[in-house]
Image (tube, coloured by chain):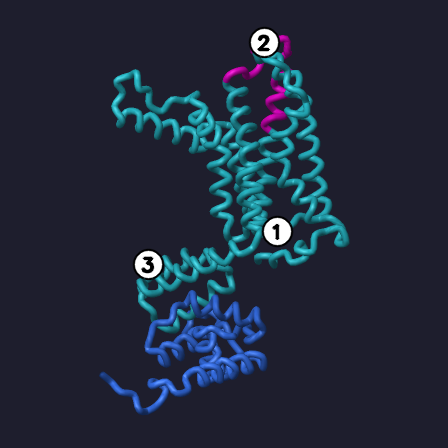
Amino acid sequence: MTRFGWWLLSVLAHALEPAERDVVLGDFAESGEGVGAATRHLLGLIVRRQTGLWWSWRPWLALFGVSWVAGLSLSRIVFRLNVDLFKYGAAYATSLTARQEVAFLLCLAGAVAVWSWTGGFVLGSLSGRAVWLTWSVFYFVVLDSAFARFVLMGNIVLRNPHTHETPLDSLRGTLGLLMATTLPLSVAALLFLFPALFGALLGVRRRILTVPHACLIGSVNAALTILMTWSTGWYDPAHLPARWPAVPWSTRVLPFLLASLPAVYLLACRLPKGSRPKDQDAAPPLVS
Amino acid sequence: MLGEFEYLLLSAAARLGEGAYGAAIRREIEGATKRRCAVGALYTTLDRLEAKGLVTTWMGDATPQRGGRPKRMVRVTGAGIQEAKAFFRAVSRASRGVSWATDRVRVS
Protein backbone atom coordinates (compact mmCIF):
# COMPACT_ATOMS: atom_id res chain seq x y z
CA MET A 1 0.00 0.00 0.00
CA THR A 2 1.26 3.50 -0.79
CA ARG A 3 2.19 6.05 1.84
CA PHE A 4 -0.89 8.09 0.85
CA GLY A 5 -3.07 5.00 1.30
CA TRP A 6 -1.79 4.51 4.85
CA TRP A 7 -2.26 8.17 5.63
CA LEU A 8 -5.87 8.01 4.38
CA LEU A 9 -6.60 4.88 6.43
CA SER A 10 -5.00 6.39 9.55
CA VAL A 11 -7.13 9.51 9.23
CA LEU A 12 -10.35 7.53 8.70
CA ALA A 13 -9.48 5.16 11.55
CA HIS A 14 -9.69 8.05 14.01
CA ALA A 15 -13.45 7.47 13.98
CA LEU A 16 -12.76 4.22 15.88
CA GLU A 17 -11.75 3.68 19.50
CA PRO A 18 -7.91 3.82 19.84
CA ALA A 19 -7.54 0.11 20.68
CA GLU A 20 -9.70 -1.03 17.77
CA ARG A 21 -7.96 1.41 15.44
CA ASP A 22 -4.58 -0.29 16.03
CA VAL A 23 -6.01 -3.79 15.67
CA VAL A 24 -7.77 -3.05 12.37
CA LEU A 25 -4.80 -1.20 10.84
CA GLY A 26 -2.58 -4.10 11.94
CA ASP A 27 -4.94 -6.55 10.19
CA PHE A 28 -4.70 -4.53 6.97
CA ALA A 29 -0.88 -4.45 7.20
CA GLU A 30 -0.76 -8.21 7.75
CA SER A 31 -3.19 -9.14 4.99
CA GLY A 32 -1.61 -6.76 2.44
CA GLU A 33 -5.02 -5.40 1.53
CA GLY A 34 -5.15 -2.82 -1.31
CA VAL A 35 -6.07 0.76 -0.43
CA GLY A 36 -9.50 0.53 -2.11
CA ALA A 37 -10.57 -2.67 -0.35
CA ALA A 38 -9.10 -1.55 2.99
CA THR A 39 -10.93 1.79 2.80
CA ARG A 40 -14.18 0.01 1.97
CA HIS A 41 -13.75 -2.38 4.90
CA LEU A 42 -12.80 0.43 7.26
CA LEU A 43 -15.78 2.59 6.23
CA GLY A 44 -18.06 -0.42 6.70
CA LEU A 45 -16.77 -0.89 10.25
CA ILE A 46 -17.11 2.84 11.04
CA VAL A 47 -20.72 2.87 9.78
CA ARG A 48 -21.54 -0.21 11.88
CA ARG A 49 -19.92 1.32 14.98
CA GLN A 50 -21.69 4.67 14.49
CA THR A 51 -25.04 2.93 13.96
CA GLY A 52 -24.43 0.79 17.04
CA LEU A 53 -24.00 3.93 19.18
CA TRP A 54 -27.62 4.90 18.50
CA TRP A 55 -28.99 1.73 20.14
CA SER A 56 -28.37 3.47 23.46
CA TRP A 57 -30.67 6.19 24.85
CA ARG A 58 -27.73 8.54 25.50
CA PRO A 59 -27.18 9.99 22.00
CA TRP A 60 -30.96 10.39 21.62
CA LEU A 61 -31.13 12.35 24.86
CA ALA A 62 -28.21 14.47 23.63
CA LEU A 63 -29.92 15.06 20.28
CA PHE A 64 -33.37 15.98 21.57
CA GLY A 65 -32.63 17.27 25.07
CA VAL A 66 -29.52 19.32 24.36
CA SER A 67 -29.22 19.89 20.59
CA TRP A 68 -32.91 20.72 20.15
CA VAL A 69 -34.51 21.86 23.41
CA ALA A 70 -31.54 23.60 25.07
CA GLY A 71 -30.22 24.61 21.62
CA LEU A 72 -33.46 26.41 20.67
CA SER A 73 -33.43 28.37 23.93
CA LEU A 74 -29.75 29.17 23.54
CA SER A 75 -30.39 30.35 19.97
CA ARG A 76 -32.79 33.01 21.31
CA ILE A 77 -30.14 34.18 23.78
CA VAL A 78 -27.36 34.23 21.14
CA PHE A 79 -29.65 36.15 18.78
CA ARG A 80 -30.55 38.51 21.60
CA LEU A 81 -26.87 39.22 22.31
CA ASN A 82 -26.25 39.95 18.62
CA VAL A 83 -29.16 42.37 18.40
CA ASP A 84 -28.56 44.13 21.72
CA LEU A 85 -24.86 44.48 21.00
CA PHE A 86 -25.27 46.07 17.57
CA LYS A 87 -28.62 47.82 17.89
CA TYR A 88 -28.42 49.31 21.37
CA GLY A 89 -24.86 48.91 22.65
CA ALA A 90 -24.12 51.27 25.55
CA ALA A 91 -25.88 54.63 26.17
CA TYR A 92 -28.83 54.09 23.83
CA ALA A 93 -30.80 57.13 24.94
CA THR A 94 -32.91 55.40 27.55
CA SER A 95 -33.26 55.99 31.25
CA LEU A 96 -30.49 53.44 31.83
CA THR A 97 -26.90 54.51 32.40
CA ALA A 98 -24.09 53.29 30.11
CA ARG A 99 -22.74 51.27 33.06
CA GLN A 100 -26.08 49.45 33.41
CA GLU A 101 -26.18 48.67 29.69
CA VAL A 102 -22.61 47.35 29.71
CA ALA A 103 -23.35 45.25 32.82
CA PHE A 104 -26.36 43.69 31.09
CA LEU A 105 -24.41 42.94 27.89
CA LEU A 106 -21.55 41.38 29.87
CA CYS A 107 -24.06 39.29 31.78
CA LEU A 108 -25.64 38.16 28.50
CA ALA A 109 -22.22 37.34 27.00
CA GLY A 110 -21.27 35.34 30.12
CA ALA A 111 -24.55 33.45 29.93
CA VAL A 112 -23.96 32.53 26.27
CA ALA A 113 -20.42 31.29 27.02
CA VAL A 114 -21.38 29.28 30.13
CA TRP A 115 -24.53 27.72 28.66
CA SER A 116 -22.65 26.87 25.43
CA TRP A 117 -19.82 25.17 27.35
CA THR A 118 -22.25 23.23 29.53
CA GLY A 119 -24.32 22.16 26.50
CA GLY A 120 -21.18 21.10 24.61
CA PHE A 121 -19.85 19.12 27.58
CA VAL A 122 -23.10 17.22 28.05
CA LEU A 123 -23.26 16.52 24.29
CA GLY A 124 -19.77 15.01 24.41
CA SER A 125 -20.54 13.11 27.59
CA LEU A 126 -23.79 11.60 26.30
CA SER A 127 -22.92 11.04 22.65
CA GLY A 128 -19.34 9.76 22.82
CA ARG A 129 -18.19 9.07 19.26
CA ALA A 130 -21.56 10.22 17.87
CA VAL A 131 -20.73 13.74 19.07
CA TRP A 132 -19.87 14.96 15.56
CA LEU A 133 -23.55 14.56 14.64
CA THR A 134 -25.21 15.82 17.83
CA TRP A 135 -22.79 18.76 18.03
CA SER A 136 -23.41 19.71 14.38
CA VAL A 137 -27.17 19.72 15.00
CA PHE A 138 -26.58 21.84 18.14
CA TYR A 139 -24.48 24.30 16.10
CA PHE A 140 -27.06 24.70 13.31
CA VAL A 141 -29.99 24.93 15.75
CA VAL A 142 -28.28 27.64 17.81
CA LEU A 143 -27.08 29.73 14.87
CA ASP A 144 -29.79 29.13 12.26
CA SER A 145 -33.07 28.58 14.09
CA ALA A 146 -33.66 32.33 14.57
CA PHE A 147 -33.31 32.76 10.80
CA ALA A 148 -35.66 29.82 10.16
CA ARG A 149 -38.17 31.22 12.67
CA PHE A 150 -38.23 34.63 10.95
CA VAL A 151 -38.70 33.02 7.53
CA LEU A 152 -41.57 30.88 8.83
CA MET A 153 -43.20 33.89 10.52
CA GLY A 154 -42.87 35.94 7.34
CA ASN A 155 -40.53 38.54 8.86
CA ILE A 156 -37.94 37.60 6.25
CA VAL A 157 -39.31 37.21 2.72
CA LEU A 158 -37.08 35.01 0.62
CA ARG A 159 -38.76 35.94 -2.65
CA ASN A 160 -41.02 38.96 -3.01
CA PRO A 161 -43.62 38.28 -5.74
CA HIS A 162 -44.17 42.02 -6.28
CA THR A 163 -40.64 42.69 -7.51
CA HIS A 164 -39.01 41.60 -10.75
CA GLU A 165 -36.36 39.60 -8.94
CA THR A 166 -35.30 36.47 -10.83
CA PRO A 167 -35.29 33.11 -8.98
CA LEU A 168 -31.47 33.11 -9.26
CA ASP A 169 -31.23 36.51 -7.56
CA SER A 170 -33.50 35.45 -4.70
CA LEU A 171 -31.56 32.18 -4.34
CA ARG A 172 -28.32 34.14 -4.19
CA GLY A 173 -29.81 36.43 -1.54
CA THR A 174 -31.09 33.50 0.51
CA LEU A 175 -27.73 31.71 0.37
CA GLY A 176 -25.94 34.91 1.39
CA LEU A 177 -28.25 35.33 4.36
CA LEU A 178 -27.87 31.67 5.30
CA MET A 179 -24.07 31.92 5.16
CA ALA A 180 -24.14 35.06 7.28
CA THR A 181 -26.16 33.33 9.98
CA THR A 182 -24.36 29.95 9.77
CA LEU A 183 -20.73 31.07 9.75
CA PRO A 184 -19.36 32.27 13.09
CA LEU A 185 -18.91 35.87 11.99
CA SER A 186 -20.35 37.71 14.98
CA VAL A 187 -19.19 38.17 18.57
CA ALA A 188 -22.19 36.19 19.84
CA ALA A 189 -21.53 33.30 17.43
CA LEU A 190 -17.88 33.16 18.51
CA LEU A 191 -18.90 33.27 22.17
CA PHE A 192 -21.06 30.24 21.43
CA LEU A 193 -18.68 28.35 19.11
CA PHE A 194 -15.48 28.10 21.14
CA PRO A 195 -16.96 27.20 24.55
CA ALA A 196 -19.33 24.67 22.91
CA LEU A 197 -16.42 23.10 21.00
CA PHE A 198 -14.08 22.89 24.00
CA GLY A 199 -16.91 21.62 26.19
CA ALA A 200 -17.70 18.83 23.71
CA LEU A 201 -14.05 17.75 23.42
CA LEU A 202 -13.73 17.65 27.20
CA GLY A 203 -17.06 15.85 27.53
CA VAL A 204 -15.94 13.05 25.21
CA ARG A 205 -12.74 12.58 27.23
CA ARG A 206 -14.05 13.03 30.78
CA ARG A 207 -17.70 11.91 30.50
CA ILE A 208 -18.61 13.16 34.01
CA LEU A 209 -17.42 16.03 36.16
CA THR A 210 -16.17 15.69 39.71
CA VAL A 211 -18.68 16.64 42.44
CA PRO A 212 -17.10 20.08 43.15
CA HIS A 213 -16.94 20.92 39.43
CA ALA A 214 -20.55 19.77 38.84
CA CYS A 215 -21.68 21.89 41.83
CA LEU A 216 -19.73 24.87 40.53
CA ILE A 217 -21.29 24.59 37.05
CA GLY A 218 -24.75 24.11 38.61
CA SER A 219 -24.32 27.19 40.82
CA VAL A 220 -23.07 29.37 37.95
CA ASN A 221 -26.00 28.24 35.78
CA ALA A 222 -28.49 28.96 38.57
CA ALA A 223 -26.94 32.37 39.24
CA LEU A 224 -27.06 33.28 35.53
CA THR A 225 -30.70 32.15 35.27
CA ILE A 226 -31.67 34.38 38.21
CA LEU A 227 -29.52 37.29 37.01
CA MET A 228 -30.88 37.14 33.44
CA THR A 229 -34.50 36.88 34.61
CA TRP A 230 -34.03 39.85 36.94
CA SER A 231 -32.05 42.05 34.52
CA THR A 232 -34.42 41.54 31.55
CA GLY A 233 -37.11 42.85 33.90
CA TRP A 234 -35.60 46.37 33.83
CA TYR A 235 -33.55 46.24 30.61
CA ASP A 236 -36.39 45.28 28.24
CA PRO A 237 -38.95 47.94 29.33
CA ALA A 238 -36.24 50.60 28.92
CA HIS A 239 -35.55 49.58 25.29
CA LEU A 240 -38.92 48.44 23.98
CA PRO A 241 -41.84 50.74 23.04
CA ALA A 242 -44.02 51.75 26.00
CA ARG A 243 -47.15 50.22 24.41
CA TRP A 244 -45.61 46.74 24.67
CA PRO A 245 -47.01 44.83 27.66
CA ALA A 246 -44.62 43.94 30.47
CA VAL A 247 -43.56 40.28 30.47
CA PRO A 248 -43.95 38.56 33.88
CA TRP A 249 -40.85 36.95 35.40
CA SER A 250 -42.42 33.48 35.17
CA THR A 251 -42.40 33.81 31.36
CA ARG A 252 -38.97 35.46 31.17
CA VAL A 253 -37.34 32.66 33.14
CA LEU A 254 -38.48 29.87 30.78
CA PRO A 255 -35.81 30.11 28.03
CA PHE A 256 -33.10 30.44 30.69
CA LEU A 257 -34.36 27.35 32.50
CA LEU A 258 -34.39 25.36 29.27
CA ALA A 259 -30.86 26.53 28.43
CA SER A 260 -29.81 25.30 31.90
CA LEU A 261 -31.10 21.74 31.29
CA PRO A 262 -27.60 20.37 30.53
CA ALA A 263 -26.41 21.64 33.94
CA VAL A 264 -29.33 19.81 35.58
CA TYR A 265 -28.16 16.61 33.86
CA LEU A 266 -24.59 17.14 35.11
CA LEU A 267 -25.84 17.56 38.67
CA ALA A 268 -28.15 14.52 38.37
CA CYS A 269 -25.13 12.40 37.34
CA ARG A 270 -23.46 13.32 40.62
CA LEU A 271 -26.41 12.54 42.91
CA PRO A 272 -25.67 10.16 45.81
CA LYS A 273 -25.86 6.52 44.55
CA GLY A 274 -29.10 5.61 46.36
CA SER A 275 -31.11 8.41 44.76
CA ARG A 276 -29.58 8.03 41.29
CA PRO A 277 -31.44 6.19 38.48
CA LYS A 278 -29.96 2.65 38.05
CA ASP A 279 -28.83 3.27 34.46
CA GLN A 280 -26.43 5.96 35.63
CA ASP A 281 -24.15 3.26 37.05
CA ALA A 282 -23.76 1.81 33.59
CA ALA A 283 -21.97 4.90 32.27
CA PRO A 284 -19.73 4.12 29.30
CA PRO A 285 -16.04 3.64 30.06
CA LEU A 286 -13.69 6.58 29.96
CA VAL A 287 -12.01 7.11 26.62
CA SER A 288 -8.25 7.18 27.03
CA MET B 1 -29.62 -19.76 18.91
CA LEU B 2 -26.57 -18.57 16.99
CA GLY B 3 -26.70 -16.83 13.64
CA GLU B 4 -24.97 -18.29 10.60
CA PHE B 5 -22.04 -15.85 10.70
CA GLU B 6 -21.68 -16.26 14.46
CA TYR B 7 -21.36 -20.02 13.95
CA LEU B 8 -18.74 -19.54 11.20
CA LEU B 9 -16.75 -17.25 13.47
CA LEU B 10 -16.90 -19.62 16.44
CA SER B 11 -15.87 -22.57 14.25
CA ALA B 12 -12.93 -20.64 12.77
CA ALA B 13 -11.76 -19.49 16.22
CA ALA B 14 -12.07 -23.02 17.65
CA ARG B 15 -10.11 -24.49 14.71
CA LEU B 16 -7.31 -21.90 15.09
CA GLY B 17 -7.06 -22.49 18.86
CA GLU B 18 -4.24 -20.45 20.42
CA GLY B 19 -3.61 -18.67 17.11
CA ALA B 20 -7.13 -17.23 16.80
CA TYR B 21 -7.17 -13.49 16.17
CA GLY B 22 -9.04 -11.07 13.85
CA ALA B 23 -7.08 -11.40 10.59
CA ALA B 24 -6.54 -15.18 10.96
CA ILE B 25 -10.25 -15.79 11.66
CA ARG B 26 -11.13 -13.70 8.61
CA ARG B 27 -8.82 -15.82 6.42
CA GLU B 28 -10.38 -19.02 7.81
CA ILE B 29 -13.91 -17.84 7.11
CA GLU B 30 -13.00 -16.71 3.57
CA GLY B 31 -11.32 -20.06 2.94
CA ALA B 32 -14.32 -22.02 4.21
CA THR B 33 -17.06 -20.01 2.51
CA LYS B 34 -15.12 -18.89 -0.61
CA ARG B 35 -16.66 -15.48 -0.01
CA ARG B 36 -15.26 -12.13 1.18
CA CYS B 37 -15.60 -11.51 4.89
CA ALA B 38 -16.16 -7.86 5.84
CA VAL B 39 -13.96 -6.52 8.64
CA GLY B 40 -16.96 -4.59 10.01
CA ALA B 41 -19.06 -7.77 10.24
CA LEU B 42 -16.17 -9.66 11.86
CA TYR B 43 -15.49 -7.19 14.67
CA THR B 44 -19.10 -6.28 15.44
CA THR B 45 -19.97 -10.00 15.60
CA LEU B 46 -16.97 -10.62 17.86
CA ASP B 47 -18.26 -7.90 20.20
CA ARG B 48 -21.71 -9.47 20.22
CA LEU B 49 -20.32 -12.95 20.96
CA GLU B 50 -18.16 -11.52 23.74
CA ALA B 51 -21.17 -9.71 25.24
CA LYS B 52 -23.06 -13.04 25.25
CA GLY B 53 -20.10 -14.72 26.98
CA LEU B 54 -19.42 -17.09 24.06
CA VAL B 55 -15.85 -15.85 23.44
CA THR B 56 -13.25 -13.91 25.38
CA THR B 57 -10.89 -11.48 23.65
CA TRP B 58 -7.72 -9.68 24.73
CA MET B 59 -4.95 -7.66 23.16
CA GLY B 60 -2.05 -9.78 21.90
CA ASP B 61 1.54 -8.82 21.21
CA ALA B 62 2.52 -6.39 18.47
CA THR B 63 4.48 -7.91 15.59
CA PRO B 64 6.68 -6.26 12.92
CA GLN B 65 4.56 -7.97 10.24
CA ARG B 66 1.63 -5.87 11.45
CA GLY B 67 3.61 -2.64 11.58
CA GLY B 68 4.06 -2.94 15.35
CA ARG B 69 0.32 -3.07 15.99
CA PRO B 70 -1.34 -5.56 18.37
CA LYS B 71 -3.73 -8.43 17.51
CA ARG B 72 -7.13 -8.99 19.06
CA MET B 73 -6.83 -12.56 20.31
CA VAL B 74 -9.94 -14.73 20.62
CA ARG B 75 -10.78 -17.81 22.70
CA VAL B 76 -14.07 -19.73 22.54
CA THR B 77 -15.56 -20.28 26.01
CA GLY B 78 -17.38 -23.36 27.27
CA ALA B 79 -20.71 -21.63 26.67
CA GLY B 80 -19.55 -20.85 23.11
CA ILE B 81 -18.77 -24.53 22.47
CA GLN B 82 -22.23 -25.54 23.78
CA GLU B 83 -23.98 -22.98 21.56
CA ALA B 84 -21.99 -24.05 18.49
CA LYS B 85 -22.84 -27.72 19.20
CA ALA B 86 -26.53 -26.85 19.55
CA PHE B 87 -26.46 -24.91 16.26
CA PHE B 88 -24.71 -27.77 14.45
CA ARG B 89 -27.19 -30.33 15.79
CA ALA B 90 -30.13 -28.15 14.76
CA VAL B 91 -28.75 -27.72 11.23
CA SER B 92 -28.06 -31.47 10.99
CA ARG B 93 -31.61 -32.31 12.12
CA ALA B 94 -33.11 -29.76 9.76
CA SER B 95 -31.06 -31.17 6.86
CA ARG B 96 -32.10 -34.81 7.42
CA GLY B 97 -33.68 -36.26 4.28
CA VAL B 98 -33.16 -33.27 2.05
CA SER B 99 -31.55 -33.90 -1.33
CA TRP B 100 -28.53 -31.60 -0.91
CA ALA B 101 -27.56 -33.22 2.39
CA THR B 102 -27.23 -36.70 0.83
CA ASP B 103 -24.83 -38.02 -1.83
CA ARG B 104 -27.72 -38.67 -4.21
CA VAL B 105 -28.09 -35.12 -5.42
CA ARG B 106 -29.67 -34.99 -8.84
CA VAL B 107 -28.37 -32.13 -10.95
CA SER B 108 -30.89 -31.05 -13.58
Determine the secondary structure under disc 3: helix
Q: Is residue A89 left or right of residue A173?
A: right
Pair 3/2: label in front: 2
- Say if the magenta span includes residue B41: no
**In terms of depth relative to the viewer, which is nearer, A240 or A24?**
A240
> Is residue A91 visible in the rendered structure shown here?
no
Residue A94, by quadrant, is top right
Residue at the left extreme of this rendering: B108
What residue sits 48% from the left and 82% below the top? B90
Q: Return the residue at label 2.
A: A243
**In terms of depth relative to the viewer, which is nearer, B61 or A92?**
A92
- Say if the magenta span includes residue A104: yes
Numbered range of the magenta stretch: A87-109
* Residue A4 tag number: 3
> Is residue A260 visible in the rendered structure shown here?
yes
Q: Residues within 10 Å of mark 2 (few under 14, many from 20)?
A: few
**In terms of depth relative to the viewer, which is nearer, B92 or A16?**
B92
Residue at mark 3: chain: A
For the residues marked 3 and 2, what is the alpha-carbon distance in whole angstroms? Answer: 67 Å
Say yes or no: labels 2 and 1 on the same chain: yes
Colour used to depict chain B in the structure image: blue
Colour used to depict chain A in the structure image: cyan
For the residues marked 3 and 1, what is the alpha-carbon distance in whole angstroms? Answer: 34 Å
Q: Return the residue at label 1.
A: A207
Are the residues at dot 3 and dot 1 in contact (C-beta closer than 8 Å)? no
Q: Position of residue A202 (x, y in %)?
A: 58, 47
Which quadrant would the C terminus of chain A be assigned to in this image? Answer: bottom right
Determine the secondary structure under disc 2: loop
Determine the secondary structure under disc 1: loop
